[in-house]
Image (cartoon, rainbow, N blue to C red):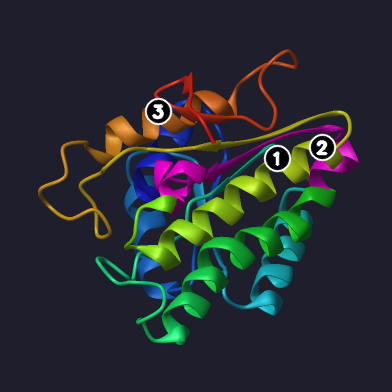
Amino acid sequence: IGYELVKQLALKGFKVILASRDPKRGHESAQKLKESDLDVSFVVMDVEDQESIRQAAITVNERYGRLDVLINNAGVYLDEYEKLLTMDPSMLEKTMRTNFFGVYHVIYSFIPLMKKQGYGRIINVSSELGAMREMSVQGTGAYKLSKLALNGLTQLVAAEIKGDIKINAVCPGWVSSDMGGPSAPRTPKQAAESILWLATIGPEGPNGGFFRDGKPIGW
């Protein structure tokens, strides 16, 4: 999904910064898109490493001096069919570190760039499994809790930010990807389209919402 998001943003005329914790894969992906005459650069960022996030924010500030759109797409899904009270606690900790704390630290480090210009659009790629109603169904506990917390973070940040800065969460659906597997019904392109409309909403657009395919869904 991340690669498709970068590609579609670049096709819309954005200067896109592709972030990856793997320098080799990141450079290769950015280079592949550049060969299609798309304006894509690369920065190393590991969302599990606060210093890596901080350095990435410094690099973006030095290189561009601004950031208009931030998409938090990194995520892990480690606990298929696992029960919360019988899984290894490290599975929950790693899931929260990536899916929740990673997003928190990325927002914390990059939002000053948006505050500086009084404009920004933040998109948190979440899941309907993070809705409160899903907590009464057992299984996938670590992933569900991480997305529940991410949805809460989305609303809390929306309540705090000033100016024309908007943050929203979006569920891309079940997508054919490394996480979703080959049998998933949605393509990365469809997922990207369902996410990217939030990148260009105007000042009257939603803030602190949760969406799927452009429509609000329950928390």
Answer with left or right where residue 190 lies relative to residue 182: right
Label 1 crowd bin: few (<14), some (14–19), many (20+), radius 10 Å: some
Q: 158 or 31: which is nearer to us?
A: 158
Q: Regarding mark 3 in the picture, which secondary structure is present there? A: helix
Q: In which quarter of the view is residue 165 placed?
A: top right
Residue positioned most to the top: 204
**Dividing the image into 4 quarters, which one contains the C terminus?**
top right
Placement of 198 over or under 2, stated as above or below: above
Range shown magenta: 113-135
1 or 3: tag closer to the N-terminus? 1
Task: Look at the numbered disc 1 and give the secondary structure of its residue.
Answer: helix
Considering only vertical position in the picture, is 207 above or below 46?
above
Marks 1 and 2 in Cβ contact (< 8 Å): yes
Q: Residues within 10 Å of mark 3 (few under 14, many from 20)?
A: some
**Farthest front residue in view:** 136
User: Which residue type does callout 3 highlight?
Assistant: Ser
What residue sits right under mark 2 in the picture? 159
**Horizontal and vertical percent position of residue 129:** 40, 47
Task: Label 2: state its secondary structure.
Answer: helix
The image's mark for residue 141 is: none
Q: Which residue is mark 3?
A: 194
